[in-house]
Amino acid sequence: MATATRRSMLLKGIIVLAALFSLAVFIPKQANAFQKADTAATGEMQFTDIPTAADSVVIRKKADSVAKAKADSVAKTGVVTKAAGASEEIPKSLWQLFFFGFAGGLAAFLLPCVYPMLPLTVSFFTKKGGTRAKAVWQSCLYGLSIIFIYVVFGLLITLAFGPAALNNLATNGVFNFFFFLMLIVFGVSFLGAFEITLPSSLANKLDENSDKGGLAGIFFMAATLVVVSFSCTGPAIGGVLANAFLKGERLAPIIVMFGFSLAIALPFTIFAMFPSALKSLPKSGGWLNSVKVVLGFIEIALALKFLSNVDLAYHWNLIDREVVLSIWIAIGLLLSLYLIGKIKFSHDSDVTHLTVTRTFFAIGAFAFTVYMIPGLWGAPLKSISALLPPLSTQDFDISGGGGAAAVIASNTTTIKEKKYEELFKRLPKVKGLDEWYDYYQAIEVAKQLHRPVLIDFTGWNCVNCRKMEQEVFPNPAILKTLQNNFVMLQMVIDDKTDLPAAEQYTSAATGKKINTIGGKMLDFEISKYNTNAQPFYVIINEKGESMVPPQGASDIETFSKFLNSGLTAYKAAK
């Protein structure tokens, strides 16, 4: 009977552990499905063969009718959904958030407030459970309780702000500046200047409740860990949530907190199943504080991303690319010297010798620092370019990649002065493209050149926009097609420049007061195409009629088919 009971308890433990892993797959997939429920049908975004002339006329009429129906829907309901093309990026985006949260959780687990709790907690369950099977079962419940607490926290953030607010917060100047200050404070805390803790009375109350037996006791024990370890995990949580808010997805906080909590919960569950494996783990010591310091340097460096967002959207013109790179290089150098023991903080232990692990981390830090140096002279640094201000903000660029785009179409039209050109001169440029920034000017150029217009709804702080500009647009075939066959119109929907008082108005689609240039461009996107996505690409003719269904961020092959199908539809309608 006892053997059967042990087997039953062990089976329950294995089932719960399997549930932890399956949730890692299930939740992002369900999140994708939930996201897609509010999007346009993905069937509208299939680009296979380039259509014939007859097919193109049908496609164009269908696209116009769909766009009109969507605009009517916005006017009646005020509800804005993301476009089908943009929804194709959602699975990848949510998976990226999950793994980012998971990586953040692993880093948080190695901090001094969490890591030393592992052997104590496993020993507690082993002794209290009496049997190995019961200990495994209780530790699994403990892990699930940790996940539940963090995911509920992410859910509360989502409910508090809502999906539309999350998208707006991603480009909001005050919000980005708040996150900049928050990450600086958290980074300085990790460096040892002070500790951020929750009230001790809360920890004591939870600890008292953890003495209760059964599920409630295990839950409050998990809650006690969350609260007590906040001085370490709080800054890490701030870092991963900051990345979640940048995405603007409604489920981003939930997904990132699920990944974060799963990384913390898994070790407690796994080592309760195999307690003998604890012997192979390194003992707590000065290296745990080194992890905190390294994360502190990283958080201070990432804080500049949020300050740069504010600088770009509000045109302060203070945080140029070389400014950020110079600070990052200095941080990288300090981090490298710290890792080899040449500098230390007051709470650090002496580094008498370098371990192999520490040596490899030092090599990585030095190598990354050296990698950034050519960026001061205009090297693209593609691996980190999405985190840097655009190359067009750099004052000294010997590569020529950040200068003004080659003037092509403007020399063959009667329009010699581009509206908003000076305003958007710091916007990322694709060398060889001639961008326009005003809808009516672009339409006039299209009439004179007899070309379709490619509308690029973009933004100062849009990461996927930068990816398209760095990986897709420069492709020789696509670049040639854009240069020779399209009028390029960029509409920067997150720009914060005030409109003249005479041009401000109340949106018929959303009912909101439109008082910025970006707000005007965003209102056009919402009213015309029922989406606030970025990037979002639309091909129209001189009458403003859509040639083919719009497209979100994509790969080279898909975008090439999109351009060719739009061009074919445009020629067929002539």
Image (cartoon, rainbow, N blue to C red):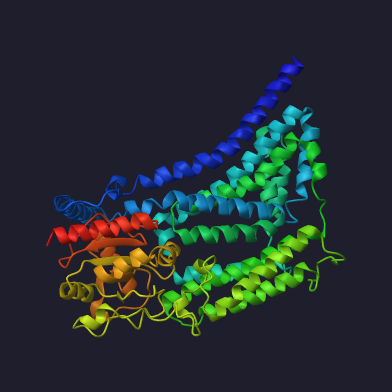
Residue 192: x %, y % from top left? 74, 68
Residue at 67 percent of width and 63 percent of height: 295
Say which quarter of the image contains residue 516: bottom left
Residue at 72 percent of width and 54 percent of height: 110
Residue at 56 percent of width and 37 percent of height: 22
Question: Vertically, is 9 above or below 563?
Answer: above
Residue 289: x %, y % from top left? 77, 61
Say which quarter of the image contains residue 108: bottom right
Horizontal side of residue 204 vs 378, given as left or right = right
Please indicate, yes or no, whether residue 329 appears anywhere in the rendered image. Answer: yes
Question: Vertically, is 116 above or below 190?
Answer: above
Question: Vertically, is 5 above or below 480?
Answer: above
Residue 461: x %, y % from top left? 44, 68
- State the residue in front, 295 or 128: 295
Residue at 42 percent of width and 51 percent of height: 90
Residue 529: x %, y % from top left? 26, 58
Horizontal side of residue 504 vs 173, given as left or right = left
Horizontal side of residue 425 vs 157, given as left or right = left
Which quarter of the figure is the C terminus placed in? bottom left
